C-alpha cells in the first residue's frame, strides 16, 4: 500500500484539479455578468478572454516546468504548483473587477503545472504495456473530479458566486499538504538531465521533441483534437442556458453525469478497447464517435436528448489515452517531462485559439442580430476540426504510426 500511495496521490491530484475546474464552471456566466455587466453573449466573450489568458501562460511556462521536473524532480514542482494555485483561487474569490479576474487567470495558468508533471510522474512509474492503462486512470481521475466538482459547485452557488472559489482554494491546499507526506520522487540520477533554456522555451521544446520519429504528426493530431475538445468547457454553460434554459444546479448535474460516464470509460474501457482495436484503432474509433456526438449536440433542442447523448460523448474519450501512450512510447525515459510539457504547450495553444473561435461562434449565432439562430454552432466548428484530426492521423504512413497490439 505504501508503494501505491504516490500513484493514488497523483490520481487524487488530477481529481482535485478537475474538481477545481468543475466547481467554478456553473457560476462563471453569473459571475462575469455580476462583475462586468451585459448579456449572456457578452459574458461568453469575456469568458473566452479569461480562458485564453490562462492558456497563453500555460503555453509559455509548460515546457519550462516540464524541464524543471526532469532536472530537479516531480515532487517540488507538484507541491509548489498546488500551493500557488490555492492562493490564486483566493485572489479570484475576492476579485471585484474583470481585470483582477484576468490577473487571477494569468497566475493560474503559470501555476497549472500539475497536469503535465502528473503525466510525467505516471510515465516514470509505468512500463510500455501499462502506459495506456495508467493514462486512462488519470483520465478516470479527471472524470471523478468532474462528478464531484460540478455537484458541489451547483450546491455552493446557492451561497453566492464566490463560494466555489473558496472551496477550490481549500481543496488545493489540503492536497498539497497530503502530497508533502506521501509523494516520493521518481527522478533519479539515472534519468536526471541537465536543464537548458533551449529545451525550456516553447519553440525549443517543440523543435527538440518533434525531431523524434513520428512525433510531429502525432502532436498535430493531438493539437487539432484539443482545439475541438475544448468546445465543451468553453461553451457548455452558455449553450445550456441559452438553448435549454438551465440554471447553475442543472449545469452542475449535467457535468456530473458526464464525469461519472467519463470516469467509467477511462478507468474500465480503455484497456479492453486497446485489446480489441489496437492503439491506432482505438484512436480512430474514439475520434470518429466524437464527430458524431458533436454534430448531434449542435442540433439538440431538448434536455432529455442532451442528457441521453452524454454517455456516448464520454465513450469517445477512449482515443486520447491510446494517443498519449503511442507518443510516450517513442520518447526516452529522461525526456518524459519534456514530452508532457510540449503536450501541455500544444494544449495551451489550442486553449488560446478554441475559446476565441468557439465563444465567437456561440455569440454570433445566438445574439440578437444572429443571421440564423443556432446556439450549437460551436459544436459544428468542433466537429469539423475533429474531422481534420482524424484525417491527419489516418494519413500517417505505417512507419510513423504505432502498430495495433495483438
Image (cartoon, rainbow, N blue to C red):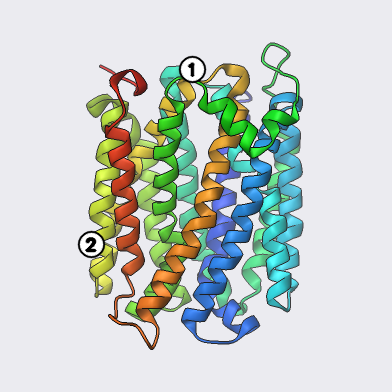
Taking 149 as reference, is 281 above or below it? Answer: above
Asked if residue 74 shows in the view, the reply is no
Query: Residue at coordinates 58% horizontally, 22% vertically from top-left?
Result: 124
Camera-nearest residue between 364 and 146: 364
Query: Residue at coordinates 31% horizontally, 28% vertically from top-left?
Result: 396
Taking 27 as reference, is 169 above or below it? Answer: above
Measured as percent of width and height from the top left, residue 122 is found at 55, 29
Measured as percent of width and height from the top left, residue 385 is found at 34, 51
Give the SS element for disc 2. helix
Sequence order check: which comes first, mark 1 or mark 2? 1
Measured as percent of width and height from the top left, residue 111 is found at 70, 49
Of the numbered discs in the image, which one, if any, rests on residue 119? none
1 vs 2, front mark: 2
> Mark 1, residues whose alpha carbon is within 10 Å: few (<14), some, or many (≥20)?
few
Give the SS element for disc 1. loop
Quarter of the image that includes the N terminus: top right
Quarter of the image that includes the C terminus: top left
Taking 100 as reference, is 294 above or below it? Answer: above
Asked if residue 224 shows in the view, the reply is yes
Q: Does 377 sit left or right of 231 as displayed?
A: left
Do tag 1 and tag 2 residues touch (Cβ < 8 Å)? no
Camera-nearest residue between 263 and 347: 347
> Mark 2, residues whose alpha carbon is within 10 Å: few (<14), some, or many (≥20)?
some
Query: Residue at coordinates 73% horizontally, 71% vertically from top-left?
Result: 100
Compute the Cα span from label 1 to label 2.
Answer: 38 Å
Hey, which quadrant is residue 186 in on the image? top right
Of the numbered discs in the image, which one, if any, rests on residue 127? 1
Measured as percent of width and height from the top left, residue 78 is found at 70, 39
Query: Residue at coordinates 34% horizontally, 34% vertically from top-left?
Result: 270
Q: Does 317 sit left or right of 173 as displayed?
A: left
How many numbered marks have been drawn onto this rendered protein structure?
2
List the residue tagged with mark 2: 296
Amino acid at each position: 500500500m505504501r508503494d501505491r500511495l504516490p500513484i493514488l496521490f497523483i490520481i487524487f491530484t488530477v481529481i482535485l484539479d478537475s474538481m477545481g475546474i468543475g466547481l467554478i464552471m456553473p457560476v462563471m456566466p453569473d459571475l462575469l455578468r455580476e462583475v462586468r455587466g451585459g448579456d449572456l453573449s457578452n459574458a461568453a466573450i469575456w469568458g473566452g478572454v479569461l480562458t485564453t489568458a490562462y492558456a497563453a501562460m500555460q503555453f509559455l511556462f509548460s515546457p519550462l516546468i516540464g524541464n524543471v521536473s526532469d532536472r530537479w524532480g516531480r515532487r517540488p514542482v507538484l507541491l509548489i504548483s498546488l500551493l500557488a494555485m490555492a492562493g490564486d483561487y483566493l485572489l479570484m474569490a475576492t476579485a471585484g473587477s474583470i481585470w483582477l479576474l484576468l490577473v487571477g487567470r494569468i497566475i493560474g495558468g503559470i501555476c497549472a503545472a500539475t497536469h503535465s508533471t502528473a503525466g510525467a510522474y505516471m510515465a516514470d512509474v509505468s512500463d510500455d504495456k501499462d502506459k495506456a492503462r495508467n493514462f486512462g486512470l488519470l483520465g478516470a481521475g479527471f472524470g471523478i473530479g468532474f462528478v464531484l466538482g460540478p455537484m458541489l459547485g451547483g450546491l455552493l452557488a446557492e451561497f453566492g458566486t464566490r463560494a466555489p472559489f473558496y472551496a477550490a482554494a481549500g481543496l488545493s491546499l489540503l492536497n498539497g499538504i497530503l502530497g508533502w507526506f506521501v509523494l516520493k520522487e521518481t527522478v533519479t540520477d539515472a534519468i536526471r538531465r541537465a536543464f537548458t533554456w533551449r529545451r525550456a522555451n516553447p519553440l525549443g521544446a517543440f523543435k527538440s521533441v518533434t525531431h523524434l520519429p513520428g512525433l510531429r504528426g502525432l502532436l498535430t493530431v493531438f493539437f487539432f483534437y484539443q482545439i475541438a475538445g475544448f468546445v465543451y468547457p468553453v461553451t457548455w454553460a452558455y449553450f445550456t442556458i441559452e438553448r435549454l434554459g438551465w440554471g447553475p444546479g442543472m449545469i452542475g448535474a449535467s457535468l456530473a453525469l458526464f464525469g461519472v460516464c467519463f470516469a467509467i470509460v477511462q478507468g474500465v474501457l480503455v484497456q479492453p478497447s486497446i485489446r480489441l482495436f489496437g492503439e491506432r484503432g482505438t484512436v480512430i474509433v474514439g475520434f470518429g464517435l466524437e464527430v458524431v456526438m458533436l454534430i448531434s449536440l449542435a442540433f439538440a433542442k431538448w434536455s432529455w436528448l442532451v442528457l441521453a447523448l452524454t454517455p456516448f460523448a464520454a465513450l469517445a474519450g477512449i482515443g486520447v489515452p491510446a494517443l498519449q501512450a503511442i507518443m510516450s512510447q517513442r520518447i526516452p525515459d529522461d525526456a518524459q517531462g519534456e514530452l508532457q510539457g510540449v503536450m501541455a504547450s500544444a494544449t495551451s495553444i489550442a486553449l488560446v485559439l478554441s475559446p476565441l473561435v468557439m465563444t465567437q461562434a456561440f455569440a454570433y449565432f445566438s445574439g440578437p442580430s444572429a443571421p440564423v439562430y443556432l446556439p450549437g454552432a460551436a459544436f459544428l466548428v468542433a466537429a469539423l476540426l475533429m474531422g481534420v484530426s482524424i484525417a491527419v492521423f489516418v494519413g500517417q504512413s505505417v512507419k510513423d504510426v504505432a502498430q495495433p497490439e495483438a
